[in-house]
């Protein structure tokens, strides 16, 4: 946490003034370029002021108007990005290592999701292209599993579960699945609406709960997560969904996954670690403990006077941010 004025650390910035903690936030935080930063290729050239009190809506209006108060607004919703209109600024998407899935609640009483075939069927009942085009307004990439194609640990040739509502209906009907309850945040409504189209085609009625405080009888929970690590999705992403202490896990402990996780923790050879990561990806794809859907893009509104580089790791890094001449 930034809780005292610098200089401190060895990063590209010196904290000139301000506080930014969960319980204590000054109106603004001022960062000055660190003239002694060790990485000459990334040494920043601009002063950064983080506005801690402006609302998201007002910040978007400011950067769109070109009034000079706000130059970069991060974390726009797909709806905000789609509605953004300006000749003074533009939307800059970052195709970071994000993942959006539907966690299947295997812990609820008499859960049908304990059956692997049924979990695979619910994956076939979701039109992932519609989730991206309609739910994310086009700002996303369809995923087969939890890792984007071409990234560290990706399985070559792994294809998303095909949208096959007919086959899904046959399996889900046999399992007695007639209604599913989907829970999420209010901002997830467009995604849930897109999911509902496919589920209805598969003969499934959908009940949605956007209250933020759902009861334990839900079937699917929309979860968006991100991978801030260059080469360790095993711990940052997979463990969170399937590991013993995973924050998003809604299933019994899985000894095979736990064995893979212990295996990768004991490995020191990068090639072997990536091989085990691919084993995890293939195993979880086959198990279908979640509904694999998409990688949402990170959306930023950026003034035309600023050169801004979004980062693959999802984190906000500003060392390459420059004022255009």
Image (cartoon, rainbow, N blue to C red):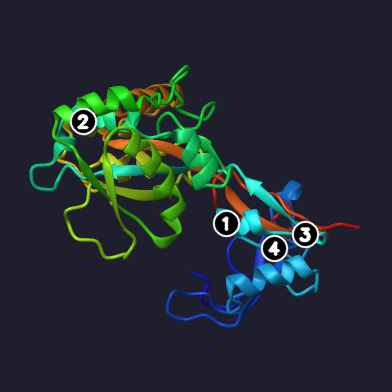
Mark yes or no: residue 1 visible: yes
Q: Work out whether 241 lies above or below 85.
A: above
User: Which residue reaches farthest right?
Assistant: 325
Q: Going 13% across and 34% down the picture, which residue do you hit?
A: 176
Quarter of the image where one finds residue 26: bottom right
Quarter of the image where one finds residue 19: bottom right
Q: Going 44% across and 42% down the picture, which residue do you hit?
A: 99
Mark yes or no: residue 97 visible: no
- Secondary element at tag 4: strand
List x then y, in percent, for residue 235. Answer: 36, 41
Say which residue label 1 marks: 79
Which circle's residue, 2 or 3, is located before the other in the chain?
3
- C-alpha separation, residue under disc 3 versus residue under disc 4: 9 Å
Say which of marks 1 and 3 sits in front.
Answer: 1
Say which of marks 1 and 4 sits in front.
Answer: 1
Mark 4 Cα shell of 10 Å, populated few (<14), some (14-19), many (≥20): many
- C-alpha separation, residue under disc 4 versus residue under disc 2: 46 Å
Q: Give yes or no for contact between labels 3 and 4 (Cβ–Cβ under 8 Å).
A: no
- Secondary element at tag 3: strand
Q: Which mark is residue 68?
A: none
Say which residue label 2 marks: 172
Q: Work out whether 234 lies above or below 223.
A: above
Q: Going 40% across and 24% down the picture, which residue do you hit?
A: 162
- C-alpha separation, residue under disc 1 versus residue under disc 3: 17 Å
Q: Give yes or no for contact between labels 1 and 4 (Cβ–Cβ under 8 Å).
A: no
Mark 3 Cα shell of 10 Å, populated few (<14), some (14-19), many (≥20): many
List x then y, in percent, for residue 205. Answer: 27, 44
Say which residue label 3 marks: 89
Which circle's residue, 3 or 4, is located before the other in the chain?
4
Q: Work out whether 93 lies above or below 283.
A: below
Say which residue label 4 marks: 72
Residue 10 relative to residue 167: left or right: right
């Amino acid at each position: 946490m930034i809780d005292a004025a610098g200089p401190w650390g060895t990063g590209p910035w010196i904290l000139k003034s301000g506080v930014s903690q969960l319980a204590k936030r000054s109106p603004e935080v001022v960062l000055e370029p660190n003239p002694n930063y060790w990485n000459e290729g990334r040494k920043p050239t601009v002063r950064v002021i983080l506005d801690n009190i402006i609302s998201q809506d007002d910040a978007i209006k400011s950067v769109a108007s070109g009034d000079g108060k706000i130059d970069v607004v991060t974390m726009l919703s797909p709806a905000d990005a789609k509605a953004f209109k300006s000749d003074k600024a533009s939307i800059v998407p970052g195709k970071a290592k994000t993942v959006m899935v539907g966690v299947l609640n295997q812990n609820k009483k008499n859960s049908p999701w304990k059956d692997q075939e049924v979990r695979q069927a619910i994956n076939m009942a979701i039109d992932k292209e519609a989730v991206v085009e309609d739910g994310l307004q086009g700002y996303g990439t369809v995923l087969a599993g939890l890792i984007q194609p071409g990234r560290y640990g990706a399985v070559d040739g792994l294809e998303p579960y095909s949208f096959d509502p007919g086959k899904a209906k046959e399996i889900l009907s046999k399992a007695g699945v007639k209604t599913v309850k989907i829970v999420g945040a209010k901002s997830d409504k467009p995604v849930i609406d897109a999911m509902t189209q496919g589920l209805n085609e598969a003969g499934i009625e959908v009940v949605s709960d956007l209250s933020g405080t759902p009861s334990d009888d839900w079937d699917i929970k929309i979860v968006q997560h991100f991978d801030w690590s260059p080469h360790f999705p095993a711990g940052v992403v997979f463990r969170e969904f399937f590991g013993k202490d995973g924050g998003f896990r809604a299933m019994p402990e899985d000894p095979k996954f736990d064995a893979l996780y212990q295996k990768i923790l004991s490995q020191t050879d990068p090639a072997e670690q990536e091989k085990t990561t691919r084993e995890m990806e293939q195993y979880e794809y086959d198990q279908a403990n979640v509904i694999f859907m998409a990688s949402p893009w990170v959306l930023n509104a950026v003034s035309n006077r600023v050169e801004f580089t979004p980062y693959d790791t999802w984190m906000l890094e500003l060392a390459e941010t420059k004022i255009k001449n």
